[in-house]
Image (cartoon, coloured by chain):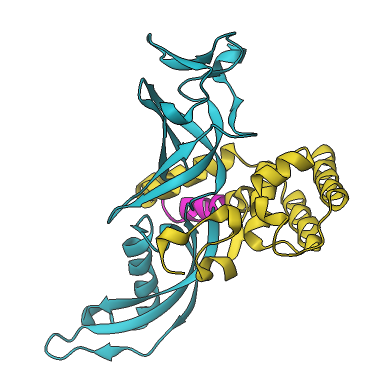
Chain colours: A yellow, B cyan
Amino acid sequence: MSGEEEENAAELKIPDEFLKAKCLMNCEVALILEHKYEQLQQMSEDPMNQISQVFEKSLQYVKRFSRYKNPDAVRQVREILSRYQLAEFELSVLGNLCPETVEEALAMVPSIKTRGRAHDDDAIEKMLNDLSLIKKFE
Amino acid sequence: MFFHIVLERNMQLHPRHFGRDLRDKLVTKLMKDVEGTCSGRHGFIVAITGIENVGKGLIRDGTGFVTFPVKYQCVVFRPFKGEILEAVVTMVNKMGFFAEAGPVQIFVSNHLIPDDMEFQTGDMPNYTTSDGSVKIQKESEVRLKIIGTRVDATEIFCIGTIKDDFLGVISDPGATS
């Protein structure tokens, strides 16, 4: 298996260095970038000068698409999802998209059913229920 | 998808910076050099979050510059083929539409938009279903699947589709106004 041709996130075929790396959900990135932005603000009067376009666009994006705003909820989401033997990448996709049904979850992350893990529909449904509870009580 | 990874870079430093705050100078220069850049392998480097270690410097013959290997942690954004993500529509035309997910641009061709959605011209060009219930226009939020990536020296560009189950518009700015 070599290079870009074989890359397919749906089958969890992504380069090793990313597969082993820590994946971040949008809500986590929002916390990190906002913290960094505040630091820059304290250091200089005009932080917009300091930051790159990539930073600005990413910050806007993650703020818009964060499902969970409160840091405790973000921590809980990761904790709940990590009980299900998911790969980092799968965990983050689920946390980002928050599918509502088992069918939707499988369409978003087809690799859940492969790799010989014991994920039946009931387990997935329980996971989605737990997620929606966090959202409700946030 | 965003990742938190460790990267390494050889930093060249001019001798005038040697002194007590050498490390600070090195970190400031590193941030200036790499934040906001993009490479095909690692994607967009959004922000440096920490320095793992600074290796031993090597003096270059003739110039006096010193090269330090620096290991740093950073947040990167790297899109993958087959990945599903949410994006904001930035431009609509008869060829399809462009959307943005953070720093990356994604093009969805009209062949990859469901067949029941027709292009409508006007001052707010859009794709609409025949019954008018679903509309894609500028500022709409869509969920799409990346089916191809093209890597440039300084940019990554993606092709996406919304012609699949559970893909398409998630919110429509026109619906509320």
Q: Is residue B54 visible?
A: yes
Image mark count: 0
Asked if residue A130 is positioned above or below residue B93 in the image, the reply reads: below
Asked if residue A40 is positioned above or below residue B101 in the image, the reply reads: below
Question: Nearest the camera: B56 or B113?
Answer: B113
The x and y percentages for residue A100 are 77, 37
Left-right relation of A120 to B150:
right
Question: Nearest the camera: B164 or A42?
Answer: B164
Left-right relation of A92 to A117:
left
| Residue A36 counted in the magenta span | yes
Question: Nearest the camera: B147 or A48?
Answer: B147
The quadrant where residue B22 appears:
bottom left
* Point 49% across, 66% down: residue: A15
| Residue A14 counted in the magenta span | no
Residue bounds of the magenta highlight: A33-46
The quadrant where residue A32 appears:
bottom right
The x and y percentages for residue A138 are 80, 41
* Point 70% across, 59% down: residue: A114
* Quadrant occupied by the C terminus of chain B: top right
Question: Nearest the camera: B70 or A65?
Answer: A65
Left-right relation of A125 to A77:
right
Q: Is residue A45 visible?
A: no
The x and y percentages for residue A74 are 72, 51
The x and y percentages for residue A66 are 63, 42
* Point 21% across, 83% down: residue: B65
Query: Predominant secondary structure in magenta?
Result: helix
